[in-house]
Every structure is written in structure tokens, then in C-alpha cells.
């Protein structure tokens, strides 16, 4: 009788996380998630955290203050008093029905609003492009 030499058999783990192809797939997903997080989270933060060019003891001018605004603060615009009545008719509401915003709010402080003014807020939206909101200054 002829004896055959036994060859070592590899342990098959097909439905386990220790499967090589499964590990590679998980590693690829982790890399993709890290790249997406890097693009979404880190780059905007680097932009927002840049130091302003102010000399010690100096102060920011109004123009520099506007440029220093955070990237998450939407654009705020004062609506002219002539356009307010037209806007209210278009929206079909009274001015008192608008949500309120304080005139000392940091986002509109530089606009110099007065009590009773209307502020137009333009927000960027990933789904709708841009959305417009209106607030009454108190």
C-alpha cells in the first residue's frame, strides 16, 4: 500500500469578521467614512478658526468684523421699510405674526436695526438650495 502524505488544511472561516475579504471591505468603509468626515468637519473648522489679523491693543473695523463671521451664521439683510407692507401682503400675514429677533443679536447687531424692522435671513440648505426666513426686530 502506498501512503500519501497529509497536506495541512487551512481553517476556513467564511462567515466571520476574521475573513480576509471581509476585513478588507470593513477597512475600505472606514477609510471612506474618515475621508467624508474630513471633508465635512475639518475643512470648514479650519476656515472658521483662522486667526484674525489684529495688532495687540487694536480693534476690528466693521468691515473686518463682517469678514470674521462664522461660516455657520446665515446671511442677514434688513428689509427696506417701503418693501415691508408689500412683503406682508405677499405672505398673507401681519407684521406681528413674524417670529422675533432681538436687536442686540450678534448676527444683526452690525446692521443697526431698530425696533419694528424686518430682517431677511437667507440660509443655505443641502436639500433646498437656499431658504428664506423673516424676523421682526424687537
Image: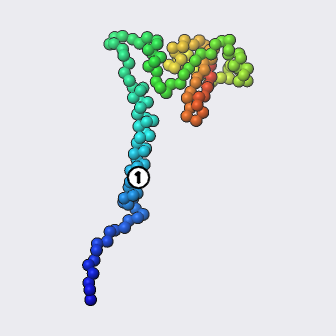
The reply, left or right, for residue 18 in relation to residue 70 is: left
Figure check: 11 above or below 26? below
Indicate the position of residue 28 as horizontal and vertical percent values.
40, 49
Q: Quadrant of residue 6?
A: bottom left
- Residue situated in front as seen by the camera: 95 or 81: 81
Q: How is the image coloured?
A: rainbow
Farthest residue to the bottom: give it.
1
- Residue at the (60%, 18%) spot, across then down: 119
Indicate the position of residue 40 as horizontal and vertical percent values.
45, 35
Q: Quadrant of residue 39?
A: top left
Whether residue 122 is visible, yes or no, is yes
The residue where tag 1 is placed is: 26
- Residue at the (38%, 60%) spot, across then down: 19
Q: Secondary structure at mark 1?
A: helix
- Image quarter (top left, top right, bottom left or bottom right) of the C terminus: top right
The tally of labels here is: 1
- Residue at the (57%, 13%) spot, across then down: 113
- Residue at the (42%, 48%) spot, across then down: 29
Figure check: 120 above or below 124? above
Indicate the position of residue 88 as horizontal and vertical percent values.
70, 20
- Image quarter (top left, top right, bottom left or bottom right) of the N terminus: bottom left
The reply, left or right, for residue 40 in relation to residue 114 is: left
Farthest residue to the front: give it.
2
Whether residue 138 is visible, yes or no, is no
- Residue situated in front as seen by the camera: 106 or 14: 14
Q: Residues within 10 Å of mark 1 (few under 14, many from 20)?
A: few
Amino acid at each position: 500500500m502506498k501512503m500519501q502524505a497529509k497536506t495541512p488544511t487551512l481553517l476556513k472561516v467564511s462567515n466571520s469578521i476574521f475573513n480576509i475579504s471581509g476585513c478588507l471591505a470593513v477597512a475600505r468603509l472606514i477609510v471612506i467614512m474618515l475621508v467624508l468626515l474630513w471633508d465635512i468637519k475639518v475643512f470648514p473648522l479650519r476656515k472658521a478658526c483662522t486667526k484674525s489679523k489684529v495688532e495687540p491693543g487694536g480693534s476690528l473695523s466693521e468691515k473686518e468684523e463682517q469678514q470674521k463671521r462664522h461660516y455657520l451664521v446665515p446671511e442677514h439683510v434688513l428689509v427696506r421699510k417701503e418693501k415691508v407692507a408689500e412683503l406682508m401682503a405677499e405672505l398673507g400675514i401681519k407684521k406681528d405674526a413674524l417670529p422675533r429677533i432681538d436687536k442686540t443679536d450678534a448676527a444683526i447687531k452690525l446692521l443697526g436695526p431698530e425696533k419694528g424692522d424686518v430682517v431677511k435671513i437667507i440660509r443655505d440648505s443641502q436639500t433646498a438650495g437656499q431658504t428664506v426666513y423673516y424676523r421682526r426686530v424687537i
